[in-house]
Amino acid sequence: MRIVSLEEIKAVLPKVDLIAEIEAGFAAYSRGDVIVPPVGEMHFDSPPGDVHIKYGYIKNDEIYVIKIASGFWQNTAYGLPNGNGMMLVFNQKTGQPVAVLQDEGYLTDVRTAVAGAVCAKFLAPKNIERIGILGTGLQAKMQLKYLDSIVDCKKAIVWGRSETSLLKYQSEMNDSGYAILTTRDMDEIIDQCQLIVTCTASEAPLISRVNPGTHITAMGSDTKTKQELDASLLSMADLAVADSRPQCEERGEIHQAMKVGFTMDGVVEVGEIIAGNHFGRTDEDQITIADLIGVAVQDIQISKAVLNHLN
């Protein structure tokens, strides 16, 4: 069994076509070629945090993957990252352990950011004046990094709850290549941005309205209690997209909207769009919303890619 350090993982990732790997995973999932059991999770109150266990395999593949990822939101007070975790890779034919990827949650952050870029590729309008980012943490930075190769826009507005976190974000993104404005006024995001990415741990809606011609990728709400969008927005959308219909029924924005009458009728999986079985955005004035919970096939794909590119 190989133990792969975070440093080794980071050295390998530039060799990988991450967009293609994650797209292939989503397409396989929507074809029914991936076995993904329900998400395992633990929640903690004091201090607040959660642990997700996602696992699965692609039929007739060589490996299966069990991923453990945690988020403890007060870790910054101790000088620690909020997220951590690892990916465990096993031989699908024998059950023998193949590798431990000690990524400290990094691969989860990367595959999540790449999924945001994939959604933008198929769902964002062509003409984007500004990208809106909700949140100031690591994912809020990584979303812009991976959107860089997909979206022809170098202007962003970032929303945060405190001036301190916004100033820190802006300072850390000085060399990102983006012209970044910061705000605590959500209306600035809604009215000036045609592509909005939400990546907070909010348990109360942050966006309550949306303008025509806007795409929202919502990825912070990955539990039964988190929510970043007002439930009415899903019903307003011309196209609602899930990474996994079964998982989005159980958690996230679609789950919250279903409590007030939204139904899964018409909800499309991103893998169906990638495979050409359903259209993505077809009109510049459409409102489109992607609800990304995170699916184990993303972890499988990125784990395989890392192992395949190791010396």
Image (tube, rainbow, N blue to C red):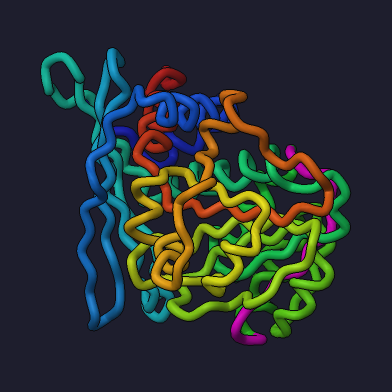
Q: Residue 217 lies in magenta, yes or no?
A: no
Q: For this rendering, which residue is in front, 34 or 114? A: 34
Q: Does residue 100 appear anywhere in the picture?
A: no
Magenta span of residues: 150-163
Give me the residue at 68% from left, 74% from top. Answer: 209
Q: Residue at x 47, y 44 (%)?
A: 243
Work out whether residue 168 can be spotted: yes
Magenta residue check for 162: yes
Quarter of the rendering containing residue 56:
top left
Residue 226 position in % (x across, y down)? 41, 71
Quadrant containing the C terminus is: top left
Corner quadrant of residue 139: bottom right
Relative to 21, 127 lies left or right: right
Q: How far across and how far down the image is residue 251, in percent?
A: 36, 60
Q: Tell me: residue 16, above or below residue 82.
A: above
Left of 148 or right of it: where is 284? right
In this rendering, position of residue 131 left or right of residue 8: right
Quadrant location of the N terminus in the rendered image: top left
x 36%, y 26%: residue: 32
Judge from the rendering whether residue 246 lies leftward or rightward of residue 9; answer left or right: left
Nearer the observer, 115 or 17 = 115
Which residue is located at x 35 percent, y 64 percent?
Answer: 223
Image height of 271 relative to 180, above or below: above
